[in-house]
Image (cartoon, rainbow, N blue to C red):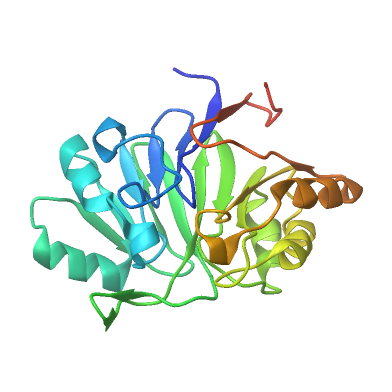
């Protein structure tokens, strides 16, 4: 059994995370100007999609099919995708609920954003809390909301992945406040610099977060960080 919990950034909001499984979140690879791999290079045991926008749903269906991996997403989007892809296993979850797959728990939590698929409402967006030895929170696309403090109280994620690019999501000021609400030891910024509209400086975020007693881990695309079983960063 692998003892290290790994987080690899594929650019934008796409990550592969996990200790015992490769959990691929929001795999926007094709059409992503920051991507350094192709969709065919990515391996996944589970695919998670936070909402239906093309820069998050991305290549999820193709990757899930190639890897024979189940897809976990919001229930309305799961229904839509299942109608078109009856060869793939979908788990449609909703706020407060979740699913356990091969020892990995994926919980749906609130997010403030929108979600449409082929011009149709695809249910609300969500963040996810993933438990695979350590607990990780992926905020998806969201603005700041006070109930992030409940995510801290209920799940206590050691690692939080937060958007900082602004325009469509939180920017740096909101992400700093969110970091305090969540109380995670490590914050990994995401959803920035993919396009001009979301250009920002992750080093500014990192510097400002230091005063909170938290650590920002700024990853390069296809860079990976590892954690031991106690949540301590290994590299």
Q: Position of residue 170 (x, y in %)?
A: 64, 68
Above or below residue 224? Residue 148 is below
Q: In which quarter of the image is residue 5?
A: top right
Residue lying furthest right: 211
Q: Which residue does the image show at 36% across and 67% down from the upper left?
A: 53
Q: On the rendered structure, is 171 left or right of 36?
A: right
Say which quadrant the C terminus sits in: top right
Above or below residue 116? Residue 165 is above
Q: On the rendered structure, is 125 left or right of 217?
A: left
Above or below residue 18? Residue 160 is below
Give the number of callouts.
0
Say which quadrant the N terminus sits in: top left
Q: Nearer the viewer, residue 64 or 94?
A: 64
Q: Which residue does the image show at 28% across and 51% down from the upper left?
A: 60
Q: Position of residue 204 (x, y in %)?
A: 79, 51
Q: On the rendered structure, is 125 left or right of 154?
A: left
Q: Which residue does the image show at 18% across and 51% down from the upper left?
A: 89
Q: Position of residue 194 (x, y in %)?
A: 50, 54
Q: Quadrant of residue 44?
A: top left
Q: Where is residue 99 in the image (x, y as percent from the top left)?
A: 37, 53
Above or below residue 53? Residue 86 is above
């Amino acid at each position: 059994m692998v003892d290290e919990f790994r987080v690899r950034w594929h650019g934008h909001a796409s990550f592969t995370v996990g200790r015992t499984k490769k959990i691929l979140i929001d795999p926007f690879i094709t059409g992503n100007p920051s991507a350094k791999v192709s969709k065919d290079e990515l391996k996944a045991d589970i695919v998670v999609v936070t909402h239906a926008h093309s820069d998050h749903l991305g290549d999820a269906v193709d990757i899930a099919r190639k890897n024979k991996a189940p897809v976990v997403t919001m229930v309305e989007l799961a229904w839509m995708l299942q109608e078109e892809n009856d060869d793939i296993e979908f788990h449609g979850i909703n706020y407060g609920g979740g699913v356990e797959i091969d020892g990995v728990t994926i919980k749906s939590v609130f997010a403030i954003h929108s979600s449409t698929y082929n011009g149709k409402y695809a249910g609300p967006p969500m963040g996810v809390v993933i438990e695979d030895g350590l607990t990780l929170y992926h905020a998806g696309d969201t603005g700041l909301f006070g109930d992030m403090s409940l995510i801290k109280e209920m799940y206590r994620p050691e690692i939080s992945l937060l958007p900082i690019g602004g325009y469509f999501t939180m920017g740096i000021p909101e992400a700093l406040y969110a970091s305090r609400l969540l109380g995670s030891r490590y914050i990994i910024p995401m959803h920035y610099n993919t396009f001009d509209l979301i250009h920002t400086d992750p080093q500014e975020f990192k510097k400002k977060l230091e005063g909170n007693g938290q650590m920002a881990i700024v990853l390069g695309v296809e860079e990976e960080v590892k954690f031991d079983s106690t949540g301590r960063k290994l590299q």
